[in-house]
Amino acid sequence: MKIALLNENSQSSKNSLIYECLTKEGKKKGHIVYNLGMTGKENEHNLTYVQLGLMAALLINTKSVDFIVTGCGTGVGAMLALNSFPNVLCGLANDATDAYLFGQINDGNAISIAYAKGFGWGSEINLENIFYKLFEEQFGLGYPKERREIEQKNKKILDEVKKVTTKDMLTIIKEINQDFLKDTLSHETFTNYLLENSKDEDINNYIKSIL
């Protein structure tokens, strides 16, 4: 999988630790990690957790990546922001069990983690365990295994519900506050990656037209 790491402003100082843990565990399964959010560098463009939702949605809907790892102080804000967009299904995982069950039962494409609440001594061990269990098996295999069919059925129903309750991504970026969109796209590392890897020509052309 192609995995994007997206950090916002309040927790950008922890980016290097998160990236190191994610890359370590991701490589074991052949995954590639792209560090596309804030990295804690001086004078870096500021990103809020709400902007992470837009960024994740653009990456997922253009098939630029397969999976998103994000978070904020509690993990809740980023999770809510990502889930407000089409085709993004983000879970909250603050330990390895959360991560494993989310992948097996909910079969989502994004995970949000708390990087302030409960983030103390030994947090790098917890992060490594989260990523290890998250990527241990193929997503959607079910847990317990005898509930696989009903869980897969419910996941398909949820996907169909979200198609009805959300607009398509091109319509969203045209109707969303354009200053908010432009400010998000001002994060050059993210935007350059998106334009180089997007499989959606219409979204690409619209983004290029406003930059």
Image (cartoon, rainbow, N blue to C red):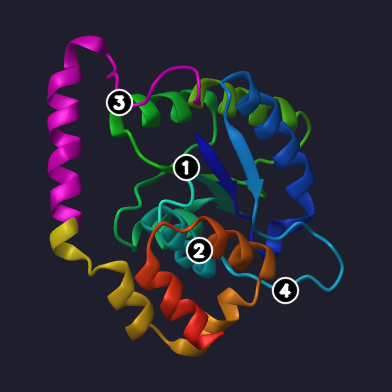
> Which residue matches tag 2?
55
CA distance for labels 4 and 1: 23 Å
User: Quadrant location of residue 123?
Assistant: top right
Q: Distance from label 2 to label 3 (Cα)?
A: 24 Å
Type of amino acid at the residue the image marks with label 1: Phe
Q: Which segment did they paint magenta?
A: 135-162
- Please determine whether, in this image, residue 18 is positioned above or below residue 95: below
User: Relative to 17, is 165 on the left or the right?
Assistant: left
Instruction: Using the numbered discs, state the Cα–Cα distance from disc 2 to disc 4 in whole angstroms.
Output: 14 Å
Q: Earlier in the sequence, mark 4 or mark 1?
A: 4
Mark 2, Cα crowd under 10 Å, few <14 / some 14-19 / many 20+, is many
The residue labelled by disc 4 is 45
Residue 163 horizontal/vertical position (percent): 17, 58
Name which residue type carries label 2: Met
The vertical placement of 177 against 114, above or below, is: below
CB-based contact (under 8 Å), mark 1 and mark 2: no
Inspect the magenta stretch and tell me whether residue 159 lies in it: yes
Q: Earlier in the sequence, mark 1 or mark 2?
A: 2
Q: Which mark is residue 67?
A: 1
Residue denoted by label 3? 140
Question: Which kind of residue does numbered mark 4 sit on?
Answer: His
Q: Which secondary structure, mark 3?
A: loop
Q: Amino acid at mark 3?
A: Gly
